[in-house]
Image: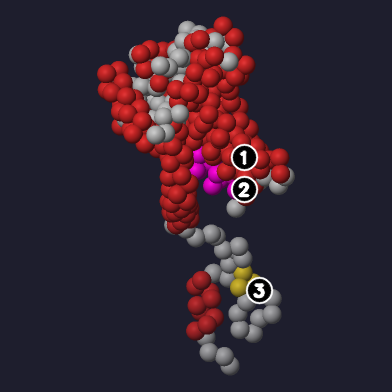
Amino acid sequence: MRKPRWWAELSLIGVVYAAYTGGRLLVRGDEASAVDHGLAILRLEGLLGIDAERPLNRLFTDVPALGIPADFAYASLHYLVTPAVLVWLFRRRPAHYRAARARLMAATLLGLVGFTLLPTCPPRLLDAAHGFTDTMAHFSAYGWWGGEASAPRGLGGMTNQYAAMPSLHVGWALWCGVMLWRYGRTPPTKALGVAYPLLTTVVVMGTANHYLLDAVAGAAVMGAGFLLAPHALRAVDRLRAGAARTAGAGAGTGEAPPVVSGGCETFAGEHIPGQRSVATAADDTSTPAR
């Protein structure tokens, strides 16, 4: 298969990311229902005994040496590592790039469906009585972010703070991890493939940006993207093949090409072709040989 053109890939990824960002802003749910969903997740985690967010959040809040790097990681790594892995695949593993990109995009669009159907308040925005501290706001003096998610100061209105379920931080990190594990050829690369999604999961919970079940949902969305992407690629290939056949059929309906011999034909008994009209040729063929 022909290697994708870098400028076409960059344009495609830019369009999809812009659509995702715009859609994420447009599907903002109301605060009351988002809070209800967040509390329901907390209750379910409590029943299952998997509510690990509070102890992690207390640790990150009480130990700045953990909390500040975690805030930097939450605010930046998904913007750096994910594109870096895409570029690495494009340059070093081109045979696998198209399928990998399709899986990432499919999972991202599925995540947008989740934000639409289940707007969820993250732990950091719940009432303080629930025991969570917004570490991004708590340590905001050390970074470029303010008190509104990981957006730069003054740009909090450009992000949907109730898009916690699923966690695409975890989903994208899992995609990066799978790509590094499958296509990396050195032990450090494979180790990074395992460590990065695990680290991201701890970070999103410790900074009180996501619940554990948000992380689980992010992994599930990425799994669904892996399953759906091959079907999407086959559909695209069928459309392209159909368009190519249509274009070929259209080209075949034009006028027949001119006769390049210019009317020179060789008749019976002649060894050198001569210029003859159709009428003359008919007369010659009707005259019996003597």
Give the residue number, with chain letter if any, for mark 3. Answer: 273
> Marks 3 and 1: which is nearer the front?
1
Which residue is drawn at the image coordinates 72% and 45% (left, top)? Answer: 186
- Judged from the image, the secondary structure of the residue bearing numbered disc 2 is helix
User: The residue under label 3 is which amino acid type?
Assistant: Pro
Marks 2 and 1, how far apart at CA: 9 Å
Disc 1: which residue: 193
Q: Earlier in the sequence, mark 2 or mark 1?
A: 2
Q: In the rendered view, would you say 170 is above or below 266?
A: above
- Residue 268 occupies quadrant: bottom right
**Region rendered in magenta:** 96-107
Q: Earlier in the sequence, mark 3 or mark 1?
A: 1
Q: Are marks 3 and 1 in contact (CB under 8 Å)?
A: no
Q: Which residue is mark 2?
A: 182
Q: Earlier in the sequence, mark 3 or mark 2?
A: 2
Secondary structure of the residue carrying numbered label 1 = helix
- Residue 29's spot in the image, x, y percent? 30, 22
